[in-house]
Image (cartoon, rainbow, N blue to C red):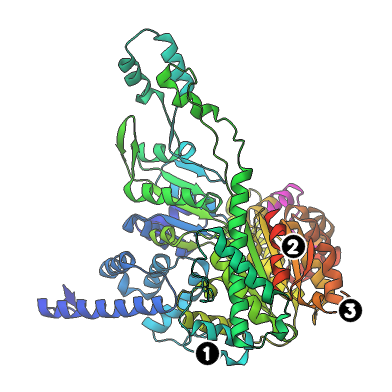
């Protein structure tokens, strides 16, 4: 091995190799900190590449590492900046690393989530401890859950100020999502009787009987699970309800095999991953970062446009119910809202609009936002009490 | 094979690659990993596989994925009809002998995955639109792509004669698993820039002059900046260029009416068409031509 014409000793070569390895592993750590999924295999391949001369050409090395370490478009877009910052010492325009703690106290909804999560119960399966130990397994537990619902379910969330009551309401929402999920699967199972015969496999399976079809093979029904996409309005006018629905979303994300969650106010944030995060503190950090600006106005049309443009193709399939939770007070352009609702309508199976205002006496959907949206909505339902959430279940089961 | 050589071979095959793609292909050889291509529909992901095939002077074996795709359609299947006929014609013979006979190579139908690992010369295995297949299939694919061998209960294990060059494409209709992503090299295929799109038009559309190709490429760049539901891809560009050449148009600005009339090659939804009125076309033409 030679460097600048001079011969390196074995020790020097080892030292150089050690430095390169250390630098490379620091880079791998940087990538992981920026949520790149980089494993040992990639690290080994990267080291091999550096040893084969790629290290001498930064552009080539960047391109090679980019292909090796990126796994999705978001990685692809931020890789060059990270590489240049790390290896070439250039400034990066957008800070990519996930910032540490963010103050969640600004938004009461997020705060209530923090109160929950800080108790160490990141999972949503929390049920009130009183008398609910036998909840799982048999029907009785669920009955008892139902009786709890009765006592509190007709209370408007706005009036739920007692933390214990709030906690209970949150737990019931999670329960409800679970009940909806299990009913759905039971119904799906019941409906899937009456299989068709799979002739090809029947013939194959009966070759040992000389082709006489003694054993019939039935075609397996392809089960496509229901997908629930929730879009939650976290603007100022909804602040009373946000805590409740966040809790409900969290429950639903856990309970439905396929669910996606978005928050919107003046812009849209995809929060499924953040809400699924097992580490409660980190989940909250991520959520509060995404929800920055919550509590202000609402631009439903613009947010729906973002949703249709950047997320719908990936997220919506033929068995998707889109659930929009909003009071429909649009501070943006109503025409745009109508256009985007029409586009959304074409894509998904059903749109349910849950409106907390509907529970108020004398409420009529006359605001410009809700008026243009309603023609495209299959279900416009009140959502100010737990009862109203529970009433959604038969509707979802029809999907 | 050097990177320059890869680039040249791709160009000769009519695929104008950017430098990053050339790096990706040279890495595929070196690290023996599959290449996962993502990007909008119509940017030429599938064409990369065919370009790669001409780099290695080999064939493409394509597995088109769809919902419900299963092993028998992807890997192998027995030819039941012929098996039954054989059984019928050997009535009375020893059952064991018949069984050995009907479960032999002669009655095995190769599907793309099996075919790909049994070729003498490594082919390009194109697994197209993997995001359309179910998650179960994706998991099964992981297994075969790591072992490159297939176990057929009646025949035993068939090991790969040669390891194919694997290219996977995805349009992002479903999120792929991390496990699959991590096994692959990743390349995001973006819309080409004006210079590359011009070269693509020149390479693929006979009779297109440099001026026209440049005008078309600039126009495409402008159209893609408009707020459309379905942005036109490279395939659409080529269609449009072919139509314009067919109409003997050599300067877009000289005949805005013809440009407007032929925009149906690019705009594929009613709303996009409605949005692209004559004034819009002329405004864009004014800017680019």
| Residue holding disc 3 | A362
Which residue shows up at 68% across the image and 79% down it? Answer: A267
Check contact, mark 2 vs mark 1: CB within 8 A: no
Q: Which mark is residue A351?
A: 2
B128 or A9, which lies in front?
Answer: B128
Distance between mark 3 and mark 2 Cα atoms:
24 Å
Circle 3: element type: loop
Q: Chain of mark 1?
A: A
Residue B239 position within the rendered picture, expressed as x and y whole percent measured from the top left = 68, 50
Quadrant the C terminus of chain B occupies: bottom right
Camera-nearest label, 3 or 2: 3
**In the image, B59: left or right of A346?**
left
User: Which circle's residue, 2 or 1, is located before the other in the chain?
Assistant: 1
Few, some or many residues within 10 Å of mark 3 (<14, 14–19, 20+): few
Camera-nearest label, 3 or 1: 3
Q: Which mark is residue A102?
A: 1
User: Which circle's residue, 3 or 2, is located before the other in the chain?
Assistant: 2
Residue B270 position within the rendered picture, expressed as x and y whole percent measured from the top left = 80, 56
Quadrant the N terminus of chain B occupies: bottom left
Circle 1: element type: loop
Q: Is residue B187 above or below residue B145?
A: below
Q: Chain of mark 3?
A: A
**Residue stretch rendered in magenta on the structure:** B240-253
Circle 2: element type: strand
């Amino acid at each position: 091995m030679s460097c600048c014409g001079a011969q390196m000793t074995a020790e020097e070569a080892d030292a150089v190799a050690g430095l390169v390895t250390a630098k490379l592993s620091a880079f791998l750590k940087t990538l992981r900190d920026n949520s790149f999924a980089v494993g040992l295999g990639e690290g080994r391949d990267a080291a091999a590449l550096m040893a084969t001369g790629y290290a001498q050409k930064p552009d080539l090395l960047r391109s090679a590492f980019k292909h090796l370490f990126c796994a999705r478009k978001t990685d692809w877009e931020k890789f060059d900046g990270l590489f240049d910052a790390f290896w070439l010492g250039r400034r990066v325009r957008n800070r990519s690393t996930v910032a540490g703690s963010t103050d969640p106290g600004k938004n009461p909804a997020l705060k209530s989530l923090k109160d929950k999560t800080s108790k160490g119960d990141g999972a949503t399966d929390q049920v009130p401890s009183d008398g609910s130990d036998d909840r799982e397994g048999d029907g009785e537990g669920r009955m008892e859950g139902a009786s709890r619902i009765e006592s509190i379910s007709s209370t408007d969330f706005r009036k739920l100020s007692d933390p214990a009551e709030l906690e209970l309401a949150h737990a019931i929402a999670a329960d409800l999502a679970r009940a909806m999920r299990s009913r759905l699967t039971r119904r799906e199972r019941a409906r899937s009787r009456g299989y068709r015969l799979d002739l090809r496999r029947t013939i194959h399976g009966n070759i040992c009987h000389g082709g006489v079809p003694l054993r019939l093979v039935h075609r397996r029904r392809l089960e496509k699970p229901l997908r629930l996409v929730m879009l939650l309005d976290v603007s100022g006018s909804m602040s009373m309800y946000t805590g409740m629905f966040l809790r409900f979303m969290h429950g639903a994300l856990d309970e439905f095999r396929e669910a996606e969650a978005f928050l919107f106010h003046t812009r849209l944030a995809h929060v499924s991953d953040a809400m699924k995060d097992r580490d409660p503190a980190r989940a909250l950090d991520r959520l509060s970062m995404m929800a920055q600006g919550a509590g202000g106005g609402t631009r439903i049309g613009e947010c729906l446009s973002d949703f249709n443009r950047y997320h719908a193709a990936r997220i919506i399939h033929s068995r998707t119910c889109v659930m929009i939770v909003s009071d429909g007070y649009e501070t943006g352009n109503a025409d745009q809202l109508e256009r985007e609702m029409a586009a959304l309508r074409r894509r998904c199976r059903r749109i349910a609009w849950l409106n907390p205002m509907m529970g108020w006496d004398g409420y009529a959907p006359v605001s410009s936002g809700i008026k243009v949206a309603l023609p495209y909505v299959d279900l416009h339902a009140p959502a100010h009490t737990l009862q109203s959430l529970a009433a959604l279940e038969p509707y979802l089961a029809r999907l | 094979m050097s990177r320059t050589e890869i680039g040249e071979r791709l160009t000769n095959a009519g695929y104008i690659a950017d430098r990053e793609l050339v790096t990706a292909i040279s890495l595929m050889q070196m690290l023996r990993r599959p290449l996962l291509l993502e990007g909008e529909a119509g940017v030429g992901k599938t064409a990369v596989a065919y370009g790669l095939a001409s780099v290695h002077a080999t064939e493409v074996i394509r597995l088109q994925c769809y919902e419900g795709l299963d092993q028998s359609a992807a890997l192998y299947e027995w030819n039941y009809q012929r098996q039954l006929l054989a059984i019928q014609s050997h009535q009375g013979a020893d059952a064991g002998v018949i069984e050995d006979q009907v479960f032999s190579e002669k009655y095995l139908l190769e599907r793309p995955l099996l075919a790909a690992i049994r070729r003498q010369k490594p082919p390009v295995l194109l697994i197209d639109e993997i995001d359309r297949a179910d998650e179960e299939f994706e998991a099964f694919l992981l297994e075969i792509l790591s072992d490159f061998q297939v176990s057929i209960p009646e025949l035993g294990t068939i090991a790969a004669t040669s390891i194919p060059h694997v290219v996977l494409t995805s349009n992002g209709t479903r999120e792929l698993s991390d496990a699959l992503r991590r096994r692959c090299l990743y390349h995001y295929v973006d819309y080409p820039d004006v210079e590359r799109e011009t070269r693509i038009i020149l390479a693929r559309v006979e009779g297109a002059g440099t001026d026209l190709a440049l005008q078309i490429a600039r126009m495409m760049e402008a159209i893609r900046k408009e707020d459309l539901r379905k942005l036109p891809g490279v395939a659409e560009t080529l269609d449009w260029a072919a139509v314009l050449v067919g109409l003997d148009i050599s300067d877009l600005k000289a005949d805005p009416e013809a440009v407007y009339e032929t925009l149906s090659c690019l705009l594929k939804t009613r709303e996009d068409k409605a949005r692209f009125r004559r004034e819009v076309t002329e405004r864009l033409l004014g800017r680019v031509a």
